[in-house]
Amino acid sequence: MSDTSRQRIFSGVQPTGNVHLGNYLGAFRNWVELQDSFDTIYCIVDLHAMTADYVPSDLESARLETAKVLLALGVDPDRSLLYTQSQVMDHAELAWILGTMTPMGVLNRMTQFKDKTGAGIAANLGLYAYPVLMAADILLYRANLVPVGEDQRQHIEVTRDLAERFNNRFGETFPVPEGYIPETSARVMS
């Protein structure tokens, strides 16, 4: 999987148990194609899924179902790393460290949090700090590129800011990742 001459891509999907055509067109088809040109790391982001109301047994079955779907669609474990977020506690540890460096004002400005709470979704700390955990996910694997939709661009900016803050404080540790829109996504979106 790892080729040091290729750029590294990180992407994640919440295990909702409800994989649909939009997931395929918006992400999974690209995940399969990206394996040919990049060092790819794909994560089932179950800690992120816990920011909404969930039933533990349903979440467990959704994790497994999501992994099966990704493998069936062509995510190849010989060419990509595919794993479940909660099985790597470094995600939570790095999120905590980054959280201590994240100004509250940055999180207060996150439009996705405002949109969800404005739509009646119960606010909790996990949802509020979601961008910090997302930054930890990306930085932990030193990703250079992150496939994103328009709704995630603000989170990538937070990730970039936190990488720079961390590097300024502790020395060059993390690459500052860029958002990436694969050509196939751009064609689907236009």
Image (cartoon, rainbow, N blue to C red):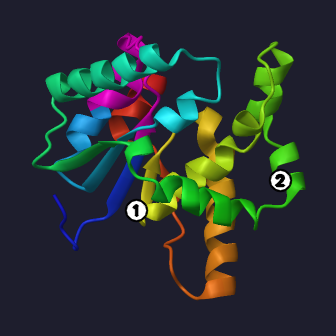
Depth check, front residue: 105 or 60: 60
Mark 1 surroundings: few (<14), some (14-19) or many (≥20) residues within 10 A: some
Report whether 131 appears left or right of 50: right
- Residue beneath label 1, please? 141
User: Magenta stretch: residue 13 in it?
Assistant: yes
Q: Which of 110 and 47 is in front in this view?
A: 47
For the N terminus, which image quadrant? bottom left
Q: Which residue is drawn at 53% across and 14% down?
A: 55
Number of numbered markers: 2
Residue 163: % across, % down = 61, 69
Q: Residue 87 is drawn in which quadrant? A: top left
The amino acid at mark 1 is Tyr
Of residue 123 and residue 152, the one placed in the foreground of this image is 123
Q: Give the range drawn in magenta.
A: 12-29
Residue 7 part of the magenta-drawn span: no
Q: Which residue is drawn at 14% across and 50% down?
A: 79
**Above-or-below relation of 103 to 116:** below
**Mark sitting on residue 106:** 2
Q: Where is residue 184 in the image (x, y as percent from the top left)?
A: 33, 33
From the top left corner, tell me how far across and down residue 39 is, in percent: 25, 58
